[in-house]
Image (cartoon, rainbow, N blue to C red):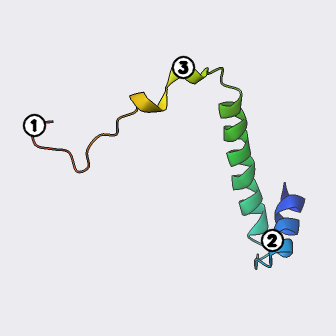
Amino acid sequence: MLAYVTAAARLVGLPLDASRAPSVAMHLGRTAAMAQALESAALAPDDEPAEVYCPAPFPPEAGT
């Protein structure tokens, strides 16, 4: 992951201090692990259809 982070930063011209690169790599690795766990969840399209989603009002309305 560290090699990827340093190569990607160099490729896009992002300044990345060598002392901070291991921390960035650690966080990217953690994010990749979370994404892998989410991708492996057995969900069907019917589990949460978009038309059912209704966000709560913000800020909360009086009486809720």
Say which amino acid is labelled 1.
Gly
Residue 9's disc is 2
Question: Mark 2 packing: few (<14 Cα in 10 Å), some, or many (20+)?
Answer: some
The answer to which quarter of the image holds residue 61 is top left
- Residue 3 in the image: above or below residue 10: above
Question: Mark 3 packing: few (<14 Cα in 10 Å), some, or many (20+)?
Answer: few
Say which amino acid is labelled 3.
Asp
> Which mark is first along the chain, 2 or 3?
2
- Residue 47 in the image: above or below residue 19: above
Say which amino acid is labelled 2.
Ala
Residue tagged by mark 3? 46
- Left or right: 59 as drawn, with respect to 50: left
Residue tagged by mark 1? 63
The answer to which quarter of the image holds residue 26 is bottom right
Query: How many labels, in total?
Result: 3
Marks 3 and 2, how far apart at CA:
39 Å
Name the residue located 66 percent from the left edge and 20 percent from the top edge.
Answer: 42
Question: x, y (%) of residue 36?
Answer: 73, 36
Question: x, y (%) of residue 40?
Answer: 71, 27
- Left or right: 62 as drawn, with respect to 5: left
Question: Mark 1 packing: few (<14 Cα in 10 Å), some, or many (20+)?
Answer: few
